[in-house]
Image (cartoon, helix red, strand yellow):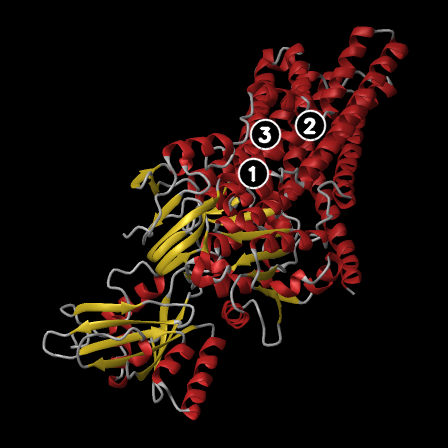
Amino acid sequence: MSEPQGSEGLTAAQAAQRLLENGPNALPASRPLSAGRLLLDVVSEPMFLLLVACGVIYLLLGDRNEALMLLGFVCIVMGITFFQRRRTERSLNALSDLSCPRALVIRDGKQERIAGRDLVLGDLVLLAEGDRVPADMELLSASNLTADESMLTGESVPVIKHGASDAGGSPDSLVYSGTLITQGTASGLVVATGPHSALGRIGASLASMGSELTPIQRETRRVVRHVAIGGLCLAAGLALAYWWLRGDALQGLLAGLTLAMAILPEELPVILTLFLGLGAWRLGRESILARSIPAIELLGATTVLCVDKTGTLTANRMDVARLCSETCTHDCQGNPATALQEELHGLLEYAVLASHRRAFDPMESAIGQTGARLLANTEHLHADWQLIDDYPLSRQMLAMSRVWQSPDRSEFLVAAKGAPEAIIDLCHLAPKRAAAIAAQVQAMANDGLRVIGVARATFAAPPLPDNQHVFDFEFLGLLGLHDPVRPEVPDAVAQCHAAGIRVVMITGDHPATALAIARQAGIAGVASAVMSGMDLAALDDTALRARLADTDVFCRIAPEQKLRLVQAFRSRGDIVAMTGDGVNDAPALKAANIGVAMGARGTDVAREAAALVLLKDDFSSLLLAVQHGRRLFANLRKAIVFIVAVHVPIVGLSILPVLLGWPMLLMPVHILFLQMVIDPACSIVFEAEPIEADAMTSKPRRPDMHLFDREILLRGLLQGAGLLAMLVGFHVLVRWAGHSDEVARTTTFLSLVLSNLGLIYVNRQWTQPSWRRGIKSNRAFAWISMAASLLLLLVLGAAPVRELFAFALPDMALLMQCAFVAVLGIAWFECVKWALSTWRWPRRAAAAQ
């Protein structure tokens, strides 16, 4: 690599002084989160305080196992909180690693390779093919230089770069930190390092955006706080009432503690944590990494999916799609058995000759691979030809020529490729012929292809001319290259539309190419509107929100505009999922409700900023993730209905005996037994329930839909109130039949436990009668039912345990009556389900009109 003329670079002393003044060429690391600060944050959480309070109550009651289980859930909450706090730090660390490669510099007149973090402003850096640019630089000289800036711009086509004297102060003379040199050599001066570079500014925008709580987290906090306060007040009131009515303070305290244990909604934070944790585990089995566990519950509410073209909709590689001469065309994506027409052999032969044999440029790599495939076993591949000279691309001539010497020919053979208009100019074509070729170019561009022209010439003898125009070129034809749409994308987009999810493409590409890709993917129709970056910049936020309603394709979009688009969609009330794989996508990924990184090809910073990472880079995995999100939210609602319904009879059976002067029906040991049914049912049975049949053909749930809404409370209260009435009536009948208080307590408790199993059975399915799904679809329910039945047998059969529960062994007739009450309960639950389903349909139809 040649050094720039007349430059000695900085001296070692100058470099050391500037490093001291400006700091290292690295992004500032975020301050590590201390264990003390983390503990303070977690302790201040109402969810944590509630779990600790429940654990203390269980310890006071002597149940250490239950207390230890709750404290175990506290550790889970602490882990999730710590994970959220560390996301931004990991994102910045990924950017830091990416932005600090090693650099070849000239200092004290000598070349030396130093760590990228030691670069300073004014350093003279030498670049060559395959180098990662270590800092933002202004090029002093460049020879046939192209740079892959897809990590910053999203474009897979390398950008041509020129020296400052040739570029006239345009951005073409700048190369940016973290980008890749794909061709040529250059020298340049460092103009920005660390946080002041383009990569550093993206890091700053990441650091400025913090994580936020999901709606379910906020709602659960509010409900837990209100119910806990109300429950504790009610429990204290019951204890005082018992003391005042019966004069027994100790029994009053026991009654109050029992009611507190019955009311305190300990299951809510527990099931939320376990549902999300198990949801992340299930996604992991499908090669979908959930980096932000609470975001899983938002998947089912996603209304807009913003996708980046390069690497997300497309494969982020260049392929030769079409070869065209003026008389014939060959589709390279068609039947591989179809031979290339003889008329096109020369076109592909000279396209290969016009490319580098050891190609870094993805376009030249694609041409070489296509030539090796279609020209195999022909005389049109020339490994034995010698390269004599080349004419690189320039601002004045967007074409390059390479001069070859054949072993069996005396004259030189010249191969040229470049922009079609430049090749037409080199060939000095007549206006009519040039216009016909231009129309052919436009047609190919409308199909989303990047078009280059190819020409050939011969030259008798050296010396070679200084200008490519001297050669007598013959026009051979056109090559159409494209970044192909991933094969799974069209079907996945169609499924998104069927699920009521709008798909929007955001790209930095040309409008015609963007629209063509969007149509291939099924995102845009024939009359779809397109908005460019210039159009977007001219709109204020209000006008932009109005345009978003009917625009699905956004082209020529800068990285900061991606962020603005995501924020604009969110301001309309949409739940936004954003996919991407480059550094330029990271701020938008983090600003979206759900950031989804394409993991296999994506950059580290995109993966760290995203909530989900598709490890297979399979776009259809998004649909699977949405399906998991919808199933999770629906099953959470079913679990909450069960919690509400099951607590109504427990609370009623704790209060009514005090008010009516009966002996206590439920004691702390009974509540603990019920928790052994309720907790696994909430956290295991409902979480494992398969998705409803129509879940992926329904519209997304409303963004403002609450987990604890009127329908949920009404369903739970109706089911629970009906069950309470049956249990109280059955208890009265048993007492009137002359049975002892212990027998009445036993039959009431047995009926309650069996009815709880019926509650689980009915609430597993809301769209059809429960018996149509059966038990086989959820093995966890079968195991819970068997375990509860065995525990009941143990309680009734073992005399010491029966005495602990204050039970007496009922006769067979009473046991059959208990089973009958449970069957009546199931019938009541099904009636409530049918009535609410019938009531909901007219409301939905009215809302849709």
Front-most of 203 and 177?
Answer: 177
Q: Residue 486 at x, y = what percent?
A: 43, 62
State the image quarter where residue 637 is shown.
top right
- CA gap between label 1 and label 2 equals 48 Å
Q: Residue 178 at x, y = what percent?
A: 43, 47
- Amino acid tagged 3: Thr
Residue located beneath label 3 in the image? 81
Labels 2 and 3: the sequence-earlier one: 3
- CA gap between label 1 and label 3 equals 10 Å
| Residues at discs 1 and 3 in contact (Cβ within 8 Å) | no
**Which mark is nearer the camera, 2 or 3?**
3
Determine whether, in the image, residue 840 is placed left or right of residue 217: right
Q: Residue 184 at x, y = what percent?
A: 32, 58
- Amino acid tagged 1: Ile
Residue located beneath label 2 in the image? 814
Indicate the quadrant containing the C terminus: top left, top right, bottom left or bottom right. bottom right
